[in-house]
């Protein structure tokens, strides 16, 4: 089993932007070696011939032709409806 120091837990917490209490640090110092051991066991599994799973819901992409649909109104007419436009685009206020 791998020994995880308090400094290791604090470093991981900093990388994860987590603020941990002293009790949580102590608990993670015990839990992390168990997690790493489990991951090591998983990496030892023989997965030859096992297809990778990318999608478990059997959903598929639905592709359609990218066609232009004319609705009987031109770009200029739509831009005229906007309060302000510039360079064939609607001008909107900055949102920060």
Image (cartoon, helix red, strand yellow):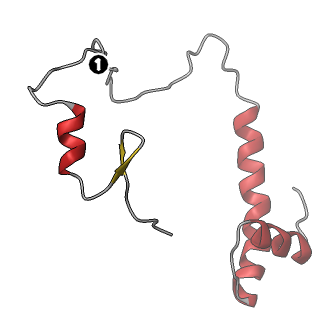
Say how many tags the image has: 1
Q: Position of residue 42 (x, y in %)?
A: 69, 37
The residue drawn where x is 17% and y is 50% is 81
Q: Residue furthest left?
A: 72
The relative height of residue 13 versus residue 26 in the rendered view (above or below) is above
Q: Residue 18: x percent and y percent?
A: 68, 75
Q: Residue at x 77, y 52 (%)?
A: 36
Position of 62 relative to 10 (above/below): above
Residue 83 left/right relative to 11: left
Q: Residue at x 78, y 42 (%)?
A: 40
Q: Nearer the viewer, residue 69 or 12?
A: 69
Quarter of the rendering containing residue 15: bottom right
Vertical position of residue 46 compared to residue 89: above or below: above
Percent from the top left, x then y, of residue 90? 33, 49
How crowded is the residue under tag 1: few (<14 C-alpha within 10 Å), some, or many (20+)? few
Q: Left or right: where does residue 25 sit relative to residue 80?
A: right
Residue reaching furthest to the bottom: 22
**Where in the figure is residue 9, as x and y percent of width and height?**
82, 72
Foreground residue, 48 or 68?
Answer: 68
Quarter-of-image position of residue 69: top left
Q: Is residue 40 above or below residue 4?
A: above
Q: Nearer the viewer, residue 28 or 69?
A: 69
Q: Secondary structure at mark 1?
A: loop
The answer to whether 83 appears left or right of 85 in the picture is left
Q: Which residue is mark 1?
A: 62
State which quadrant residue 75 falls in.
Answer: top left
For the point 51% across and 69% down, the residue is 96
Q: Is residue 34 left or right of residue 96?
A: right
Task: Name the image quarter holding the N terminus.
Answer: bottom right
Please tell me which residue lies in front, 35 or 16.
Answer: 16
């Amino acid at each position: 089993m791998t020994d995880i120091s308090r400094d290791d837990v604090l470093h991981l917490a900093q990388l994860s932007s987590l603020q941990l209490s002293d009790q949580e640090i102590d608990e993670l110092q015990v839990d992390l070696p168990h997690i790493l051991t489990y991951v090591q066991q998983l990496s030892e599994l023989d997965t030859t011939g096992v297809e990778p799973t990318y999608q478990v819901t059997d959903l598929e992409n639905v592709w359609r032709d990218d066609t232009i649909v004319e609705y009987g109104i031109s770009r200029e007419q739509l831009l005229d409806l906007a309060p302000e436009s510039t360079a064939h685009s609607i001008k909107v206020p900055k949102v920060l």
